[in-house]
Each structure stands twice: as structure tokens, then as C-alpha cells.
Amino acid sequence: MSRADYIYLKTTNRILEEGSWDTNMIVRPKWEDGTPAHAAKIFNVNNTYKLADEMPIVTLRNTNWKAAIDEIIWIWVKKSNNINDLNSHIWDQWADESGSIGEAYGAQARKKAIYKEGMFDQIDRVIYYLKNQPAFRSMITEIFVHEDLHKMHLYPCVHGMNFDVTDGKLNLFLNQRSNDTLAAGSWNVVQYSALVYMLAQVCGLEPGMLAHEVVNAHIYDRHVPFIVHITFSRAKELQRRIENLDACQLISLVGRPEAKTKFERFQNELLKEHIEFEKLIAEAKELEKAGLVDAKAYQEYTKKIVETSQFERAKYIIDTMADNPEFEKILGYKSPRLILDKNVTDYYDFISPKTRDSQGKIVDNPESSFSVEDYSPETEGVKLEARVPVAE
């Protein structure tokens, strides 16, 4: 598991426990069989990631980090709004016959405006200040432009960035209006983390923090069993590792006595009651296969799950791990790291991890400027069988 996994599960567990359902409302998204895609949602999620410590990729299910970074290059390097410049199919359903998605994303990124210092587009203005006046407090981009919304095929989900430099480290505050937490909860974090790495490298800075603010974080009804499955499977694995550690191992794994003491208290509390998660995992698997229960049934299923002692125990394990980064070393997990080609000093020289071959097939790019170390996704049981075609 990665540090990002704990943060991800803490968010999804909060949605399961506190989420407000829209089953009695009219919703725009539909499942492929035409059924309305209802969801449970919470207001205001703000997660912070230390980019110097890890590239925050969720390992609980495979994250296509190469396609995620390719999309960020499409928007903020190529500044394109045409899917023919994108090396994935994630925007195909919103494109017109020419491949355009309207005046969205890259179209907004490339628009120039006159500032006191001259004419820039949004990202070039940020680069100018990062290089020349990093203490500037208005390094801001915004692509949710109201006057152009009617010309966008989909309103931007991730829309605003506010950059900050502190002690030579580049930080980013990222605004997102809406997030499909299971399908895209890791995707946006990965790609905007990569953007911080890129800008830091070409501007002589170090990667700092990513603060990710989501106004509406939601889980769609048919995704609930997958989240339940992930939660209990990972809590079970964490519990197994925690139970198998003894004091001697703790001493060898942790140099700081206070970390060892804190972990032993957590371990003792956990071992008071051994809980088997297999039954709830099996139930979730059966519901995953069905995938045709109506939204109110999923709502009732969620209510039943969060009221169980097993969920409380799983939540306790995951939240404790999320709040205590020093426990990662104790349990032997490695955090993924993003490696950039150090020869790249011009922002526009970064090469995408994805490309198209001579036949137009999308393939991994051997010339890419990006690689990830220590990334081992755990995909058992979390393949999405049901997809929201118009996810946001």
C-alpha cells in the first residue's frame, strides 16, 4: 500500500458513513443500460500529499498513471482540446466529428491575456513568476470560464490551481468541483502531482505539497460494493501484518521509541477483538457480479454495512494508519516515486509516457521523460464491471 491508499480509503469510508444520497433527485449520469446513476456524496474533502515523500498513486486498484500524465500534458503542455492530440480514449464520448471537446481545458489553457509584465497564457505566466518572483501570491490559473461554458462539451471538473513557493519547495492548491471517487479518486491526484514535479524541475525548485480540494466527492450506487470490498480486504491485510509483528521486530523496524510506543498501543487495542472480514467481502463480491440492484437497495446496503462492528474496526485500522505516516515503515510498505528525466530544463520538452505508433495504436512511449518506482497495484476484486459513461 502507499500513503495515498490510506488517504483514499479514509475518504471513501467517510462517504460511506456520512454520504447523502440523491436517490430522490433527478440526475444527469446514466449507466450503460439507461438506469440513472445515483450516488452518495459528501461536501468538502481536502487531502494533502507530501510529494517529496511519495508520488501519491493509489495501489488498491490499477491506476493508469501513464494515461493520467498524458492527459495533463495534453491540457497544460500541448494546450489542446482535440482528442487527436491525446494518447488515450478517455475523452472520445465528448468529442465532435473533428475531435474537438469545445472551448474546454486546453482551449482555456492556451488563451492569452495582457498582464503588467506582458502577454501570457495562464501556465506561462505561472512559470514566469516561479522563475522571477516566486514570492508572488497570485500564481493562479482558472479554466471554469462562465462566458465559455456553453461552448464546452463538458464543464471542467478540476478547474483551479493556486501555486505557492515556501523554502524553495513548490506547493499546489488544487480545486475540483466534482470527483467520482472510485473511478477517478487517484487519477487527478497523480496527474497534478506530476505537473508540480515538472514545474519544480524547470524552475529550480523542489516538489512540496499538493492540497486537493473536492467540493462534491461521491460514490456511485453500483460502485458501493467495490468500495466495501476494497475497504475490508485492505483492513484484513493490515490486521494480519499488525498481528504478526512482535516487540523485537518493532525495535528493529523503528528507530524512534515514541513511534514504537504509539504503534504498540494501536496493536494492543486492535488485538482485543479479532474480526474476520471474509463474510462481508464475499457479500460484496456477489453484489459486484450482480450490478443491477436499484439505487435505493444500494443505499440500504451501505447503511447496513456502516452499522456493523466490522466496518467500525476496518475504519479504525485505516484511519489510524492514515493519521500516522511513521507506521508505514513498520508494516514494510514502500511508497511509489516519480522519476523525471533530469536533462529536461524546458517545460515544453517533457515527453509523454503514451504515444501512437505508425498504425495509430496507443502504446507506451519508450522515449518518455517519466517513470515510476515501487509501484505495485493490488487489483484483486476491484476491477470495475460497471462504468458511469458520463462520470463527473
Image (cartoon, rainbow, N blue to C red):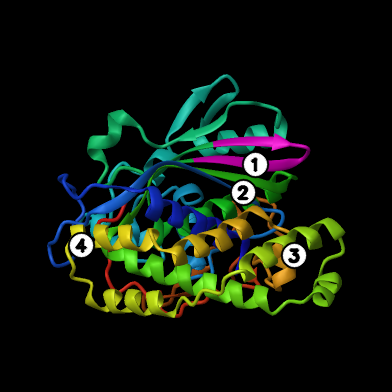
| Mark before the other along the chain sequence, 2 or 4 | 2
Q: Position of residue 37 (x, y in %)?
A: 21, 57
Q: Within 10 angstroms of label 2, few (less than 14), some, or many (20 or more) residues?
A: many
| Mark before the other along the chain sequence, 4 or 3 | 3
Q: Which mark is residue 196?
A: 2
Side of 254 relative to 96 (left or right): right
Q: Which mark is residue 264?
A: 3
In this picture, which residue range is highlighted in magenta?
162-174
Q: Position of residue 2 (x, y in %)?
A: 61, 65
Cβ–Cβ under 8 Å for marks 2 and 4 = no
In terms of image quadrants, where is residue 168? top right
Disc number lying in front (1 or 2) = 1
| Mark before the other along the chain sequence, 3 or 1 | 1
Disc number lying in front (4 or 3) = 3
Disc 3 marks a residue whose amino acid type is Glu
Q: Within 10 angstroms of label 1, few (less than 14), some, or many (20 or more) residues?
A: many
Side of 148 relative to 206 (left or right): left
Disc 4 marks a residue whose amino acid type is Ala
Side of 87 relative to 303 (left or right): right
State how far apart marks 2 and 3 are (Cα): 37 Å
Cβ–Cβ under 8 Å for marks 3 and 1 = no
Cβ–Cβ under 8 Å for marks 2 and 3 = no
Disc number lying in front (1 or 4) = 4
Q: Position of residue 139 (x, y in %)?
A: 58, 31
Residue under numbered circle 4: 297
